[in-house]
Amino acid sequence: MATVLCVSNQKGGVGKTTTTNALTVGLAARGLRVLAVDFDPQGNLSFGLGAQRPVEDPRTIYQVLKKELPFSEAVQHMPDGFDVIAANLLLSALDIEFTGAGREYLLRQALAPVSGRYDAILIDTPPDLGLLTINAFTASDYIIIPVLCDLYSLQGLIQLNSTLRQVRMRSNPEIQVAGVLLNRFNNRERISQVVRETASNIAQSLGMPLFRTTVHTGVALTRAQVQQENMLAPGQRSRAVGDYRALVNELLQRKVVMKNG
Ligand SMILES: Nc1ncnc2c1ncn2[C@@H]1O[C@H](COP(=O)(O)OP(=O)(O)OP(=O)(O)O)[C@@H](O)[C@H]1O
Ligand SMILES: [Mg+2]
């Protein structure tokens, strides 16, 4: 069975999609069988990985959740060796279409039959704590929480933790925090050092590990996504790219994810 990781934070623009993209290409390059699930109606992950599907295209995660399409017809096999299941704006309708009991299990149920085909399933989530994010938490073994290096971002961890507590009580007692990931770190700013210490204290008080790896600011990350290039391809050499390679190593070393069979 695959290890399922979701990348989540209700705050917008903290690097959820960038992190999901980097881990997808990074783990695939290390020989793991990876499925990337775009679970954000913005469709940014689909775009960055070169797998976007317009609203007219009925082959996205939305149709799979609605049981209108088998997974095998929605999944895309990408040239760099990973699979993607795309999302677009239609996914935002899920909230009003599913109102009954068990609505938080839709993604978990959709992934269960294909879990054996992968080593890692990575889920990108929208910037809120609504039904889509609850579905991602319910489907996941681990959550990765990117945060920006400012003190407001750290406050958001407390709210996120309380949602996680509810999910543990209701739909997924097993979910663990793989780590809080400091993103857009800048060594030269004294505030970043203060944030690192504060983040470490807050994370510890919430029982969340902090990743050893921090991700520096690097325009290469944005450029790769805009140009739909592999963010961690051998030609990509910026410091931020190196940080994501280190994060891939950290996850493998800690055996959060591993190659099965
Ligand atoms: N370390 C970084 N250095 C430079 N730019 C970054 C870094 N991390 C993310 N970005 C850029 O910041 C923007 C927001 O990042 P991203 O889309 O990953 O955030 P998000 O949390 O997924 O946003 P949303 O909440 O809208 O889904 C993007 O343009 C991305 O390329
Ligand atoms: Mg995003």
Image (tube, helix red, strand yellow):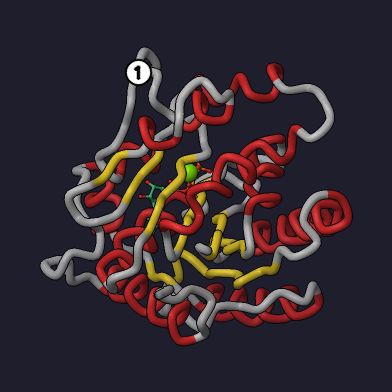
Q: Which residue is mark 1?
A: 57
Please determine whether, in this image, residue 37 is positioned above or below residue 249. above
Q: Residue at the top extreme?
A: 56
Q: Residue furthest toward the bottom?
A: 253
**Residue in the image at 32% along x and 74% along y:** 245
Name the residue rendered at 46%, 45% in the picture: 37
SS at mark 1 in the image:
loop
- Residue projecting furthest to the left: 235
Q: Is residue 192 above or below residue 104?
A: below
- Tell me which amino acid carries mark 1: Asp
Percent x, y for residue 134?
71, 44
Horizontally, residue 158 falls left or right of residue 64, namely right
Tally the numbered discs: 1
Q: Residue at x 36, y 31 (%)?
A: 73
Give the image location of residue 241, x and y in percent.
28, 69
Q: Which quarter of the rendering shows the C terminus?
A: bottom left
Mark 1 closeness class: few <14, some 14–19, many ≥20 residues within 10 Å? few
Q: Quadrant of residue 161?
A: bottom right
Q: Is residue 17 left or right of residue 8?
A: left
Residue, x 52% and y 36% (percent of image)?
40
Q: Is residue 233 left or right of residue 92?
A: left
Residue 171 screen position, x and y as percent: 80, 50
Front residue of 104 and 41: 104
